[in-house]
Amino acid sequence: MSRTFRIERFGSVDSTNRLLSERAHDGAPAGLVIVADAQTAGRGRQGRTWTSEAGQGLYVSILRRPAVPATEAWRWTLLAGLAARAAVAPHLGGAGAWLKWPNDLFVGTRKLGGILCELRSTGGAIDGIVVGIGINLRPPGGGWPPDLSSRATSLLEQGAPDGLRDRVLKSLITSLEQLERELARSGGAADLMAQARDAMAPMIGRSASVELGGAVQTVVVTGLADSGALEVLDEGGAARTLLAGDVHLLG
């Protein structure tokens, strides 16, 4: 792991993303990493809560200040997802992890982790990207809540040994840094998209429920565009793209 990253550890915070956003506003340099044993108000996309008990998971936020236009910030969600996938891969045996568009880390049909990237920008320039990542290391002490019992998993439940948090954290940061270097190379964007398409391959050809034009439709996932948008066929068979939103895979 590069010395350009500096880790601050906390027993409990409301949200690692919120705390790092505050530090970013105060001028913290790129590479600041906030890690917490627990979050009291962990967040997912669209304001959803993230179960964040002490000892249950890796809760980390990483500050990046890339010298790219704000229009390129979406790539960091892909970078974070690929880095998270690489970090857990050695501990999953033959199960393997995959990425569910736009920001979920899955093993089989169960969610192992999630990504929440938040952009700070001025005009068309990036002031900073807070890369938030949560990975389930073990189930909650009392077991998964009923609404998650059939949809969530952890490294421990996938056969990984306990006590992996620091190893996964180090691998996560190292992988993110390597992916950023690859992206900065000539042709790196194409390489990133190729890796993202491979990571999201389990979605292709699947039916999904999405919101299109203000109505929920059943679509078929067909691919990932170079823009990062999800490509689908709508109920009428027309090709459409999703730039944001929830995708609920069916069957």
Image (tube, rainbow, N blue to C red):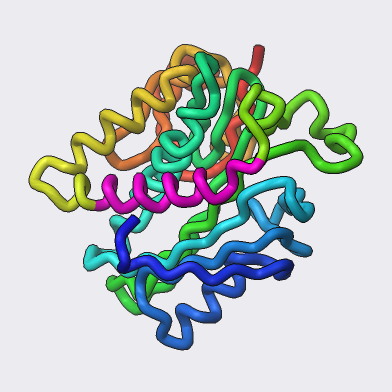
Label total for image: 0
Magenta span includes 175:
yes
**Which of 184 and 53 lies nearest the eye of the viewer?**
53
Q: Is residue 178 visible?
A: yes
Residue ID at (62%, 55%): 59
Q: Main secondary structure of the magenta part?
A: helix
In the visual, does 8 lie left or right of 251? left
Locate residue 228, reporting x and y percent.
35, 40
The quadrant of the rendering that contains the N terminus is bottom left
Q: Residue 150, how many percent across, how many down?
A: 79, 24
Q: Magenta stretch containing residue 45, yes or no?
A: no
- Is residue 216 visible in the rendered image? The answer is no
Q: Give the image quarter of residue 162.
A: top right
Q: Which is nearer the eye, 6 or 223?
A: 6
In the image, residue 22 sits, relative to residue 118, either above or below, namely below
Image quadrant containing the C terminus? top right
| In front of the other: 94 or 238 | 94
Which segment did they paint magenta? 163-180
Question: In percent of the image, x 35 and y 71: which residue is there?
Answer: 30
Name above or below for residue 93 compared with residue 8. Answer: above
Relative image position of residue 204 (x, y in whole percent):
44, 17
Against 127, residue 132 (above or below) is: above
Q: Which residue lies at the image location 47% right of the left edge and 29% below the top edge?
A: 89
Q: Position of residue 178 (x, y in %)?
A: 27, 47
Outermost residue to the bottom: 26
